[in-house]
């Protein structure tokens, strides 16, 4: 019974990790897609032709691809740039600057604020999870790699703590230099 309770607790925590990640990414991507649409509409008011014609499509593409961690914004920027080139090739420069500004805002302020510590992974492990997931399973692997890696790290942490406790070994928590 005790073992079943532990397994249920691990499964509940794993589901919690996945749902926190997806909820945060969906909110973040929705905001970035809407911000892209609104920015393109505002830029078109200042006389940049072609932006208002494809603003909704580009906003949706950027919002959807933004769900992929790290590489998604670049994919969305390239796809949006291709759409802009089809409509008006000269305006792709305005679009590139706009996307750069929006993605900087997302990466520096919005993303960390919304996602916070939902996964608890260091950036190196996030990039590792995306690269390995993408290499093994394509775009779906890039999307699912981060929460999967977070669950794997959580389970490994439980296993290591179990064996340390079994051998009566106590370890002081690591204080990162950021907290000093």
Image (cartoon, helix red, strand yellow):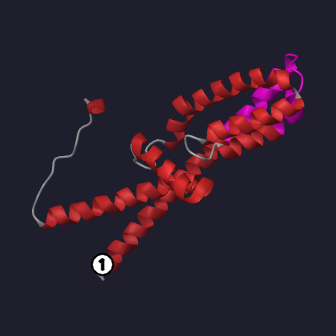
Task: Please provide percent x and percent y for residue 126.
Answer: 45, 46
Q: In which quadrant of the rendered image does the N terminus lie?
A: bottom left
60 relative position to 150: left or right: right
State the image quarter where residue 149 is shown: bottom left
- Is 88 or 38 nearer to us in this picture? 88
Residue lying at 54% horizontally and 54% vertically, measured from the top left: 135
**On the image, which quarter does residue 14 sit in?**
bottom left
- State left or right for residue 107 relative to residue 56: left
State the extent of the magenta-drawn residues as a range: 30-56
In reply to whether residue 50 is colored magenta, the answer given is: yes
Task: Note whether 30 is above or below 12 in the view shown.
Answer: above
Q: Is residue 4 left or right of residue 142?
A: left
Specify the farthest residue to the bottom.
Answer: 1
Quadrant location of residue 96? top right
Q: Foreground residue, 29 or 74? A: 74
Relative horizontal placement of residue 29, taking residue 116 as reference (left or right):
right
Taking the spot 64% from the left edge, 24% from the top edge, the residue there is 101
Task: Give the residue at mark 1.
Answer: 3
Q: Residues within 10 Å of mark 1 (few under 14, many from 20)?
A: few
Q: What's the magenta bit mostly, secondary-structure-wise?
A: helix
Residue 28 is situated, as x and y percent measured from the top left of the image, at 61, 42
On the image, the x and y values in percent for residue 105 come to: 59, 28
Q: Residue furthest top?
A: 46
Q: From this viewpoint, which residue is outermost toward the left?
A: 168
On whether residue 122 falls in the magenta region, the answer is no
Instruction: From this view, report whether residue 127 is shown above or below residue 17.
Output: above
- Residue 139 seen in this snapshot: yes
């Amino acid at each position: 019974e005790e073992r079943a309770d532990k397994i249920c607790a691990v499964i509940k925590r794993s589901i919690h990790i996945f749902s926190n990640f997806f909820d945060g990414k969906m909110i973040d991507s929705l905001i970035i897609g809407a911000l892209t649409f609104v920015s393109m509409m505002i830029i078109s008011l200042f006389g940049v032709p072609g932006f208002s014609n494809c603003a909704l499509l580009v906003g949706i593409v950027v919002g959807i691809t933004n769900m992929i961690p790290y590489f998604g914004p670049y994919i969305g920027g390239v796809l949006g740039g291709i759409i802009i080139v089809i409509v008006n090739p000269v305006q792709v420069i305005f679009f590139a600057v706009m996307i750069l500004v929006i993605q900087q805002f997302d990466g520096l302020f919005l993303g960390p604020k919304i996602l916070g510590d939902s996964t608890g992974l260091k950036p190196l492990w996030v990039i590792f999870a995306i690269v390995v997931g993408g290499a093994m399973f394509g775009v779906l692997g890039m999307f699912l790699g981060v929460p999967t890696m977070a669950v794997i790290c959580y389970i490994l942490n439980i296993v290591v703590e179990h064996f340390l406790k079994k051998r009566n070994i106590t370890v002081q928590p690591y204080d990162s230099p950021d907290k000093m």
